[in-house]
Amino acid sequence: MNNRLKVLRAERDWSQAELAVRLDVSRQAVNAIETGKHDPSLPLAFRIARLFGMPIEEIFDDQS
Amino acid sequence: MTSPERDERPMSGAVRLLVIVAAALVAIFAIGVIAGMIGAAMNDGGAHSAIFYLILLAAVALAAGAIWLIVRNRAVMDLPVSPRMRKSRMLLYSCGVIGIAGGMAFALVGGGGEMGAWALFSANEPISPTAVLILLSVLILATALSIRWHMLLDEHERAAYDFGAVVSIYIYFVLSIGWWLLARGGFAPAPDGHLIFWVVMITWLIGWLIRRYR
């Protein structure tokens, strides 16, 4: 699944570790989501959407 | 200024983690040798040969080198600020400390007899009752901590463990039944449950490593 996590994170000048702390997950989890190796669960996707103040579908795109 | 690109190389972290794991195993082995030799010296009393002290010195050097490697690569072990990850890491380190303490106690009581710590890796060598009680205590305590640790994992790491578990279950299924059939047909000796156990555990570890750090 494609996502804009890396771009959104870069816009805020956050490192993966900083984003991981905000989401209460490991840095490896953030890396895996950004690179499309792990699709987040619905609860985590909602946490990400709330953190960036955007709807889920503006962050994640299931149509490549 | 924070660079968003600065920490996007998971494999470098994986290599450092592997170095730490390997160094920890070497350190545990060396500390076990030291504890075993000190235990033997306490039991024997009297003077020992130069070779005894040379081996002891080599074991101390090996332990010191391994600990130096762990300290040198410790950045990968830094505690994250996230409360859940911090608790998870602390539990993991606690399991490691308990394991090392148990190994040292095992060596000090001479649990493995003449085989020393190697008796742990043998399926049939006798182990002293005191050592068995020590190891059972470590097993129960470490299992309780591990269960709590699993409850704290984030979904990515849990998925990595699930992947490793599924692969190792398949390895267990194929290896145990395949070996049993081969033995019944006269193609192989009787299945070795001890060997199968280690193959399954190592497969689980490799599966977890691949999925988490790929």
Image (tube, rainbow, N blue to C red):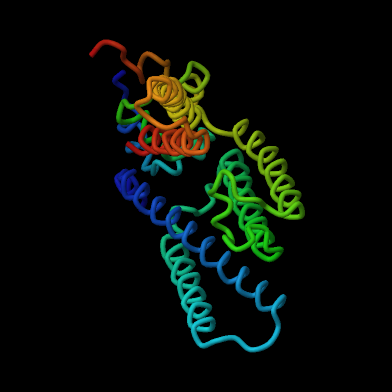
Q: Is residue B193 above or below residue B75?
A: above
- The residue under the point 34% across, 47% down is B7
Position of residue B183 measured from the top left corner of the image (x, y, whole percent)? 41, 25
Q: Is residue B170 above or below residue B90?
A: above
Position of residue B174 measured from the top left corner of the image (x, y, whole percent)? 40, 21
Foreground of the two, B191 or B103: B191
Foreground of the two, A51 or B80: B80
Question: Residue furthest toward the top?
Answer: A63
Position of residue B69 measured from the top left corner of the image (x, y, whole percent)? 42, 65
Judge from the rendering whether residue B165 lies leftward or rightward of residue B48; answer left or right. left
Judge from the rendering whether residue B146 lies leftward or rightward of residue B22; answer left or right. right
Indicate the quadrant containing the C terminus of chain B: top left, top right, bottom left or bottom right: top left
Residue A53 appearing in the image: no
Residue B186 appearing in the image: yes
Position of residue B135 measured from the top left corner of the image (x, y, whole percent)? 69, 49
Question: Residue furthest toward the left?
Answer: A64
Foreground of the two, B142 or B14: B142
- The residue under the point 31% across, 25% down is A36
- The residue under the point 50% across, 29% down is B158
Q: Image quadrant of residue B148?
A: top right
Judge from the rendering whether residue A64 lies leftward or rightward of residue A62; answer left or right. left
User: How many numbered marks does the figure carry?
Assistant: 0
Q: Is residue B156 above or below residue B173?
A: below
- The residue under the point 67% across, 63% down is B110
